[in-house]
Image (spheres, rainbow, N blue to C red):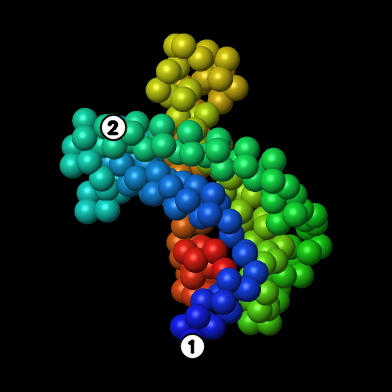
Amino acid sequence: METMNAVSDAQREPLIHPRWLRITHWLNALAALIMMFSGWRIYDASPVFPAIVIPTSITLGGWLGGALQWHFAAMWLLVCNGIVYLVLNLLSGRFASKFLPLSPRAVLRDFIAALSGKLSHADLRQYNAVQKLAYLAVVIDLVVLVLSGLAIWKSVQFPLLRELMGGYDNARVVHFCAMAVMAVFVVVHVAMVALVPRSLLTMLRGR
């Protein structure tokens, strides 16, 4: 009886993250991490900034050819899964309800509250303004990563995209900077999850 009551209570908990969101979230995370670690190995083969060298111990692929294989495999996963993620977010109305409205004043207010330790995380169904900005920024960043990567990979086939990036060499700079932004997001995101572990449980269980 107690077990049945526990199951019943769990079913009555509000659904925060639907199954499709959790699946696409974890697939996006996997693809982004693989691309980041393999991308660092590719970068070391021809650094954009010679003074910046990524330690081999935190790269993926073992050598340039292996890193490229990992990178391209993860690229297809990121693009296909990312499109599904964006389309379902837009069609379900979740994108507008979770991330909008957003204003600079709200971001500043919540940022100050976070620094002072006064930012509430009691209701995980609602994102604060700083979270909204961070999630929107990383979505845009991933789009820039894909487009700049395409301008590098298929520079001849997509001359307009290459020129919009400022040429091949500038596209590499854009790609590296977008990767750096994603790396910072991952570090901050993991730190926030460590501070509010319930957020990890909701992304696993949905409730």
- The picture quadrant where one finds residue 164 is top right
Q: Residue 68, labelled with which disc? A: 2
Q: Residue 2, labelled with which disc? A: 1
Q: Are marks 2 and 1 in contact (CB under 8 Å)?
A: no
User: Which one is earlier in the sequence, the residue at label 2 or at label 1?
Assistant: 1
In the displayed structure, does residue 129 sit left or right of residue 45? right
Q: Residue 114: image x %, image y %?
A: 65, 75
What element does badge 2 sit on?
A: helix
In the displayed structure, does residue 97 sit left or right of residue 173? right
Q: Whole-Å distance between the Cαs marked 2 and 1? A: 53 Å
Q: Nearer the viewer, residue 39 or 31?
A: 31
- The picture quadrant where one finds residue 129 is bottom right
Q: Residue 174: image x %, image y %?
A: 51, 35
Mark nearest the camera among 2 and 1 is 1
Which residue is located at x 50 percent, y 47 percent? Answer: 24
Q: Could one spot residue 192 in this view of the protein?
A: no
Which residue is located at x 49 percent, y 87 percent? Answer: 1
Q: Could one spot residue 28 in this view of the protein?
A: yes
Q: In the figure, 198 relative to 27: above or below?
A: below
Q: In the figure, 8 relative to 16: above or below?
A: below
The amino acid at mark 2 is Leu
| Image quadrant containing the C terminus | bottom right
